DNA sequence: CTTGTTTAGTGCGAATTCGTTCTATAAAAG
DNA sequence: CTTTTATAGAACGAATTCGCACTAAACAAG
């Protein structure tokens, strides 16, 4: 199963990344209330980690998904009372997304539920390996993101 | 933006992985014929890399998606003449999936189109870093997969 | 052999994701 | 200021993903 060429290694890395993403989404959803799925939590978490009051478009860029996908996710979150939206004072076209108290609480509770899972993985995998992995993944992410704008991949009005 | 605790590092790593997965899916789809999307290619590639003649259920396990999702993907691929299915001689309940010549050709063409993209990323990121990343990602993937079976996450009849 | 349980795949409807089109506003050009 | 051009979001329908119920075959127990 050894990869012999450069493309093979890249392929294998992206393949592993794809599977890990799928696995962690499944694990996350197992700790979420039934009516919520991965992307819902991703939005809540993003609003806490980066900042409240972002526009939907900014989040579409951050997650690299079409704006219509974010729009639907936000609609569900708003209906559940986990976020609220207000007009953007700086731009009449757009709006800003704010967490409600319920949204913050749900995020905290979910993270608490994930704690033991993370702890188990950290113990087996080693925290130092995670720490070592992080900057490499960051720069790879940034690089692929840049490369997207160069290689003629049509990012269209949807993505950026 | 520095992460101070273990959970934060894990979170950040999984977050980067999620974005990279999303970005590479978008990049892949930009090189695929319009009527095909990421999962279609993933199946074709898997059948070449692992082996022809797998059952749908085996692929559902490999990709960690519900069997009904794979079923739909296979239905599209079969309609496009990229795969064909035959009954499983060892098990009357299941069937085996085989690549057609058209399926092999499409995979080759797609990989050829991705070549320059991969080369660009490899040049910037460094092949050695990919090589170093791979085993870590592999073991992380295996670990999360194992952990899923332990922590009471209901993998149900769908996943495994 | 018969019965009860598990597993692979299908059918079907709901939820989600996405591309296209449209409207309103902002930004740029003249 | 007026006229283009670009952007944010909404509306809408198609494609995809998924959960649940069902069928048929394998397997285990008796």
Image: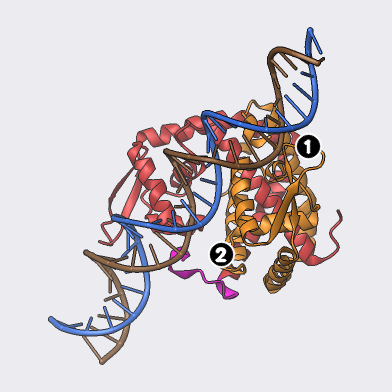
Chain colours: A orange, B red, C blue, D brown
Q: Residues within 10 Å of mark 1 (few under 14, many from 20)?
A: few
Read off the residue under disc 2.
Answer: A35
* Residue ID at (78%, 58%): A48
Q: Is residue B22 magenta?
A: no
Q: Which of A54 and B66 is in front in this view?
A: A54
User: Which of the 4 quarters of the picture holds residue A39?
Assistant: bottom right
Q: In the shown orientation, is residue B116 left or right of residue C28?
A: left
* Residue ID at (73%, 34%): A146
Q: Which of B40 and A41 is in front in this view?
A: A41
Q: Is residue A122 above or below residue A143?
A: below
Q: Does the magenta stretch include residue B159?
A: yes
Q: Where is residue A107 in the image (x, y as percent from the top left)?
A: 71, 65
The chain holding disc 1 is A
Residue interval drawn in magenta:
B149-160
Q: Which of B13 and B107 is in front in this view?
A: B13
Q: Can residue A4 be seen in this view?
A: no
User: Which of the 4 quarters of the picture holds residue D20?
Assistant: bottom left
Q: Can residue A89 be seen in this view?
A: yes
Q: Which mark is residue A91?
A: 1
Q: How far apart are marks 2 and 1 (CA)?
A: 33 Å
Q: Residues within 10 Å of mark 2 (few under 14, many from 20)?
A: few
State the SS at label 2: loop
User: Which of the 4 quarters of the picture holds residue C26?
Assistant: top right
């Amino acid at each position: 199963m050894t990869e012999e060429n450069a493309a093979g290694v890249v392929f294998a890395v992206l393949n592993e990344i794809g599977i890990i993403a799928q696995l962690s989404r499944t694990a996350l959803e197992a700790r979420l209330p039934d009516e919520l799925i991965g992307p819902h939590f991703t939005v809540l978490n993003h609003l806490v980690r980066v900042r409240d009051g972002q526009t939907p478009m900014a989040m579409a860029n951050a997650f690299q998904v079409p704006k219509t996908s974010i729009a639907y996710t936000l609609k569900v979150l708003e209906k559940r009372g986990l976020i609220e939206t207000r007009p953007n004072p700086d731009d009449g076209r757009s709006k800003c997304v704010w967490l409600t108290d319920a949204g913050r609480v749900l995020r905290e509770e979910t993270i608490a539920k994930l704690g033991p899972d993370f702890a188990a993985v950290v113990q087996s995998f080693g925290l130092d390996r995670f720490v070592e992995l992080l900057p490499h993944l960051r720069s790879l992410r940034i690089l692929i993101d840049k490369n997207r704008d160069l290689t003629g991949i049509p990012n269209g009005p949807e993505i950026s």
